[in-house]
Amino acid sequence: MPYFSVEAVPSYRRRRRAAGTTLPGARPRRETSTGVTLLLLEDPGILRDRDLWLELRARDPANPARGWVPAYHFAMRLDGVDRPVGRLGFRVGSTHTIEQFAGHLGYEVAPAYRGNHLAERSCRLILPLARRHGFDVLWITCNPDNWASRRTCERLGAQLVDIVDVPPNSDLYGPGSERKCRYRLTL
């Protein structure tokens, strides 16, 4: 997909920004502490590994008031299966909450399809997209007692950095989610 500089087309950029839409083919920029707006790609490309593929379901804009960054939401799909077998979210930006508690990647596999490394394979499919967005490190978090997710992180090559307490006033705090393992995945 060819890139073009959005800065070189200011009137187009203003119209798209005013409409609240993403820029097709635009080179995404990483969110910074200065509040640079991230651009989500309209078409992240083909994300396929043998019989597994990711179907883009939604692109969520940032919500600074809640501390949310833009995100892609994908359905995990298997050839020959009519409905999604799981889901994967990729949060495109870094904040304290993302790096400490939520992680850049979140995944869930339907019980009937667990044990087939679908979460690991799906995460691997996202890595080129993460690089396109300028990431060189991704954070993945999970509950300490979620051994399957911890093993997924290890199989990806992520390193356990620490286990942290989730603040009780956080959206992520709840029964069974009082603590999070933080894994660092270097791309």
Image (tube, rainbow, N blue to C red):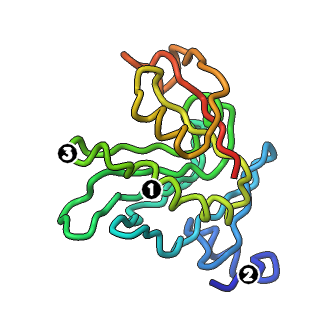
Left/right of residue 82 with respect to residue 62 in the rendered view: left
Residue type pointed to by label 3: Ala
Going from N to C along the chain, the mark reached first, 3 or 2, is 2
User: Who's the residue at 73% across and 55% down the image?
Assistant: 30
The quarter in which the N terminus is drawn is bottom right
Closest to the observer, 112 or 68: 112
Q: Which residue is mark 1?
A: 122
Instruction: Tell me the quarter of the picture where residue 54 sits.
Output: bottom left
Q: Which residue is mark 3?
A: 112
Residue type pointed to by label 1: Ser
User: Who's the residue at 42% across and 51% down the image?
Assistant: 88
Where is residue 70 shown, x and y percent of the image?
57, 53
Mark 2 element type: helix
For label 2, count other residues whose C-alpha is less than 10 Å away and answer few (under 14), some (14-19) or many (20+): few
Residue type pointed to by label 2: Ser
Q: Is residue 43 above or below residue 167?
A: below
